[in-house]
Amino acid sequence: MRATTLLRSLSRLHPQHTVVTAFKLDTDRRVLVLDVKPAARTRRCGACGKRCSRGYDHRVRQWRHTDLGETRVFLRYRLARVDCPRCGPTTERVPWAEHAAWHTSDFEELVAYKAQGADQTRVARDMRISWDTVGHIVSRVVKRLLSVGGDLLDGLRAVGLDDLSYRKGHKYISVVVDHDRGRLVWASEGRSGATIDQFFKELGPERAAKLKFVSIDMSAAYEAAIKTNAPNAVIVFDRFHVQRLAHDALDEVRREIVRELKNTPEGKAVKGTRYSLQRNEVNHTPKDAERISTVMATNAPLYRAYMLKTMLAWILSTATVADAERRLEGWIDWATRSQLKPFVRVGKTIRKHLEGILAYIRTGISNGRSEGFNGKARVITKRAFGFHSAAALIATLYLCCSGLELNPRHT
């Protein structure tokens, strides 16, 4: 067996695509350079793949390939420029790397595979490349996989819309999660109605008409965008955010009472009750039960707020829509007559969004998928010690959370 054939086999270069003509080994630097050329004789445009008549202005170029043990491997080739009838002057296509890339496709897929389970710094150190290069490679691999792996927006029936903060200073991205498949299908910078309009523009009116359910928090911008672009979809307000309204109102009432009763025996009885009041009854400890009993005996407004919070959680667990509607109407009347301003405000909010809340009872759909995805996204962000741009975060989220499968040849 010739040395070039052996090296081609060890480097896992496809014999029908790439020919190894020579090699140079630098043992001191532990670098192996393979002189290669495409097996096909016809030159094609590197951008669009269209056949080109001739090549000119040849220049030697190297691509980083996957390592052989501790030895770094580079592919070297006299790359030609071509005149593409569609793209104009550009460089020719090579089978081992993407157009304008400085690393082979095998190398890039291995980097992306490692980035699915490790932070960017570790991948950069293991692969002996720069930190920024890892991000560029991930973006390129994700774009390549999404272009050949089918449209993630096909077949959507029920989706969840949510936003995710990725940096201080109100830096957000909007994400769309498929409830049926439990994976990310779309993400973009921003969290306005215009951002969601962009999602529906990419989805198209035909596929938007097939959406049956869209779960969101109580964002007015998201709600307006959905009604405009997918009028047939049922908007489902997430149970967690509905309950959160009551929890926040309870905490607001408690803080106001603490301020009013500061340095009094009644104020001391209220102080330290925050977590006992916020916990569900099934999770109460004996100490929590004692504190709730004290509040019931000494502070009627705070106990009324606690009961309003507890009752709303119970109503949202109702099995039938008719019972839930009747009980929510009663809860709204109670809240608006409670003389507790925060709960009066919550009552008006729930009345305004009653149909979407009842849709949760009817369908059982919530933003649990989206919230679970946000948990994964925060782990990814923390693992990377933050992201400098939305594009880098979005590419990593697609890589790790959209169902993309990588099976690199060198693992």
Image (tube, rainbow, N blue to C red):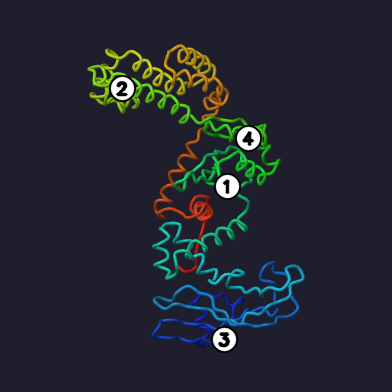
| Label 1: few (<14), some (14–19) or many (≥20) C-alpha neighbours in 10 Å | many
| Label 3: few (<14), some (14–19) or many (≥20) C-alpha neighbours in 10 Å | some
Quarter holding residue 215: top right
Question: Which residue in the protein does label 1 denote?
Answer: 186
Q: State whether residue 394 is above or below residue 235.
A: below
Dot 2 lies on which element?
Answer: helix
Question: Which residue in the protein does label 2 denote?
Answer: 258
Q: State whether residue 184 is above or below residue 272.
A: below
Marks 1/3: CA–CA distance: 44 Å
- Mark 4 or 1, nearer chain start: 1
Q: For the residue marked with disc 4, what is the amino acid? A: Ile
- Mark 1 or 3, nearer chain start: 3
Task: Give the numbered dot on residue 21.
Answer: 3
Residue name at image x 67 percent, y 82 percent: 57
Residue 212 percent across, percent down from the top left: 62, 34
Marks 3/4: CA–CA distance: 59 Å
Marks 1/2: CA–CA distance: 45 Å
Q: Which of pointers 4 and 2 indicates the residue nearer the eye?
A: 2
Question: Which residue in the protein does label 4 denote?
Answer: 226
